[in-house]
Amino acid sequence: MSLYSYMAWRNIWRNPRRSLLTMGAIAFATVILIFMLSLQFGNYSTIIDSVVKMRTGHLQVQATGYQENRDIHLAVADPSQVAATLDRAPEVSGFTFRAHAFALVSSDNRSYGTVVTGISDRELTTSSLARTISEGRFLTEDEGAQALVGNILAKNLRVKPGDEVALLGQGLDGSVAATIVTVRGILSSGQDQFDRVSFYIPLPYFQELFGMGEAVHEIVVIAERLEDVAGLKQRLEEEVAGDTGRALRVLDWKELSPGLLEAITLDLMTGFLFYIVLIVVVAFSISNTFIMAIFERKKELGLMLALGSRPARLTGILFLEYGMLTTLGLAAGILIGCLVTLYFGAYGIQIPGMAEMARHYGVPERVFPQLSFLSVGIGSGLVVGISLCTSLIPVWKVRRLRPVPAMAEG
Amino acid sequence: MIYDVCPPTIHLRKGMKVMIGQAVFALLVILSGAPVCPAADTLAAEHIVDTAIRYYRGQSSAAIMDMKIVRPAWSRELSLKAWTKGQKNSLFTIISPPKDEGNGTLKKGDEMWTYNPKINRIIKLPPSMMSQSWMGSDFSNDDLAKSDSIVEDYVHRLIGAEFHEGKRVHVIQCTPKPGAAVVWGKQVLKIREDHILLLQEFYDEDNRLVKFLTGTQIEPVGGKVFPRFWTMQKGTDGRDFTIVAYREVRFDMEIPDDFFTRTSLTNAWR
Amino acid sequence: MLLQLAWRNIWRNPRRTILILAAVTIAVWSMVFSSALMRGIADQMVRNGIATLTGHIQIHQQGFRDDPSAAMHMKNPTELKQTLQDHLPPGALFSARVRTNAVASNARHSGGVTLVGIDPDREKKLSFVSSSIISGNYLDAEDPYGIIIGTSLMNSLKTRVGNKLVVMAQDTRQKMSSRAFRITGEYRAELEATEKEFVFITLPAAQNLLKMDEALSEICIVLPDREKVRETAAALARILPKDHEILAWQEMLPLVTATLRLYESIIYLWYLVAFTAMAFGLVNTFLMAVLERIREFGLLRALGMKSRWIIQGVMTESFFLLVIGIALGNALGAISVIGLSHTGIDLSVFAGGTQYWGLPKIIYPVLLASDAILVNGIVLVLGLLVSGYPALKASHFTPVEAMAHT
């Protein structure tokens, strides 16, 4: 330890109460920033996850053109090949197959045109569909003529579990696809646009009904983590899309739910406004303690100048002091911030009013902050920046300090 | 064989009902050549269209048709029986392939019902389905349900004349009347002087061709000179089209009104 | 005496005082401003919800909400309108509508929509449509063929103003009824879903299409005061026939109601955070101020001053500082809120063209008196509480301790 550092260190502990308060302010700012950022990021990954798990998946493999045209003929003829690739990929946490067809669904005297979706048993390991069952129960692949119906569609059709619904559509070969299915369960995702149209039947039954053979329209992939998606997409594009001469195509969640990213950006920007306000408050809190300390030590600093210390050396020591205070405060802040975030990350936070919102958007009713390098990095980076800036003020003050008036004051 | 296409209750009436007055008027209009005034022009054009539609549909008809739907990647054939009466009522039922046998469509006025024998249900088509294709063909449900609207909902104007197989052909532009529930920007019809519809073009509002129906191989069919093949083509690239060929047809027999009921829809194919 | 002394003490070291004042001012400003932002977002959501056809109160035939068809209509519009005229508070607006599910199609595309027949003049005063036209014109009451559609629907039907749109719906007798309209105007809404869903024609055109005669599906009421909604709804429920359903916006927009509650809790959490951040600065500054005057306190103690008085003295000082800081903070908050109340904070640059949630793209801060009072109360009470620590400290210096302090 050099002499300077030693002096700075000594200075800090000469007035432990002041130093502790300063560190406390820094630590608190760090904790708050880390926690809030984790909360916001956590919220986004919850939202992305739930939209993704509810509907689209992180990635989908589709026939080229299906996303735009929704033509029943644009199908993935041999999904098992893609499945083999997915089975080998370590980042894949689950995948499932879906097939869609436009059909007329009809109860005793009401009919609606909707999109019928065939789902496999893999759905349980991939999507949150099963959790939105509000009445009846979920489908299994071997059950045949059974259906899950969105609650608004069910209300419009006036059907409940156990009732029959006629399905009339057109198969892959153009022939009439007609059947009667029994409503097995009602789905309430809380999202009207889905609950108005949702109609699910078992995939093998769908394939038989619509003459699809083994073909499906979407292979829905959930990655282990959101961060894995980009890499996985690239690999799949090379392996799957490349092998089939671009007949297949890989789409990620941003392409599958356009608008979601924009909504998150808007929310982030709204949050950003509040961060600015928070940063202003934190900056004041830190700079206040720093400036105050200088006032208080004016006499001491004047004495040192009078004793022949060069101002440069004095500012050096002061900088070191602030550096140490910031480092200690920051360290404590990061530690506490991480612990607090981890605690709430495990147990979640329940905010009044959140439950209805959550149900509507199909997200969990608790908020789970998510600790990440990003939130810790941004949070502590901001604090370091603020400390650095505010420490310049007292240092600048010292440069203008004249020994005699300083000692005379107070 | 022709009896096959008629339900037992229907008695054929010999001969064709000819509306003499109308025919004479049409003849006069056609012979007089260029129209003298716009009103007469419009009236004449409307009359040509009306006569052609009546000629085409007859007072009533019963037919067996083969339909071929062609797409770049696949094609499909089916056969059906069809009955029409006036311009409001019609009934179609598929007789082959066996997989689709018995699927039928009943049209009364602007409304349609569909029947599937496998589930033995009649389903009324909701509004949202009317613009969907009929049995996957290039004909929409609306094409079938609204075949009469070409006379009632449009203002007609003669815009040219051509010759086809030595006969004069009227080119008529049909513009929808304001408020008429018509999606097209305009239609252009080519009607031969013997009332045969050769071409019907459907344009959007920007005057781009959406689809067109052509009649070919004009020959005596069921006692009338008539195009045996009708092709509905989407767009102009010739990739997607549907051909309907009349195998047998009979016009102007007596079909009771109560034939066009839901009961017939379920039984017609048997 | 005490007050005077405290006041003089404050200005003995103006620089320190200014620092404390700045800390309090910034904290109060941050609370006032951020709650105004939050209220602004919430208020915008409520307004948008209300302007997007919801209004404050709606009247329907019982069962309309479950089955919004032409058959579910109110048959005595004249009587109903008279009742409303007689019983609604002065300044209240209402507008009659016909509403049903329909299909809109052109030559190439078609889509499901909600057809709304409106009285253009009355509707202008209480919903968003007339003020949201971005091309073409608003509906003309005399134009039986005019229709107004949203940008998003316009795009999905690939059509434009001036083009035709055929609307098909089931009439009161469950028969299909259709008619062509000409697109006279295009509107933009806050939510893409709104643009996709609603098409507007005149009330007589809708009644004619659906063969409803004079009947109505819906009456939408906007009151001069949003706070009176529940009261008025309850009053209407007593007067109107039992087969009418009267709904307040809180019931029609459950999601907005939930969002309001959520924001309420977030605002309180935010107060806590901002206050704690401020408290560090406050305690530190006070503490230093006290330590600096350690000799003075020691001397006072030596002269026989009771520690209670010293506490009182220090607390009075902090009270002054807090009150001045709060006043400045309120002023600053008010200035920033007023300054932004016209232009708002525009976030649309980041949000692109579409909307997923109901978040507004431009935030206009709204300052509620209740929030301001709460902020002032919290800062004053908790501020005094935290300054209790330095005060206590000051009262406990022993004269010896104090004199030893350099």
Image: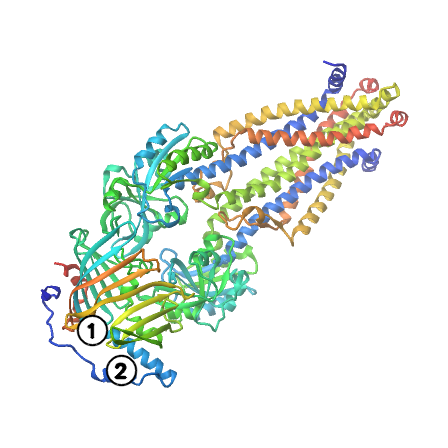
Q: CA distance from mark 1 to mark 2?
A: 17 Å
Q: Secondary structure at mark 2?
A: helix
Question: Does residue C309 appear in this view?
Answer: no
Q: Earlier in the sequence, mark 1 or mark 2?
A: 2
Q: Position of residue C238 (x, y in %)?
A: 44, 60
Q: Position of residue A195 (x, y in %)?
A: 37, 48
C21 up-or-down from A394: above or below: below
Name the foreground residue: A27 vs C186: C186
For residue B58, the mark is 1
Along the horizontal axis of the image, is A37 left or right of A79?
right
- Give the label, 1 or 2, closer to the camera: 2
C147 up-or-down from A69: above or below: below
For residue A42, the mark is none
Q: Position of residue A236 (x, y in %)?
A: 40, 34
For residue B26, the mark is 2
Neighbours of disc 1 within 10 Å: few (<14), some (14-19), many (20+) = many
B188 up-or-down from A58: above or below: below
Residue, x 79% and y 35% (percent of image)?
Answer: C17
Query: Quarter-wise, where is residue A320 in the image?
Result: top right
Q: How many marks?
A: 2
Name the foreground residue: C249 vs C390: C249
Q: Amino acid type of disc 2?
A: Ala
- Asked if labels 2 and 1 touch by Cβ distance under 8 angstroms, the answer is no
Query: Looking at the rendering, in which quadrant would you find the N terminus of chain C?
Result: top right
Q: Amino acid type of disc 1?
A: Gly
Neighbours of disc 2 within 10 Å: few (<14), some (14-19), many (20+) = some
Name the foreground residue: A166 vs A373: A373
Write down the chain letter for disc 2.
B
Write down the chain letter for disc 1.
B
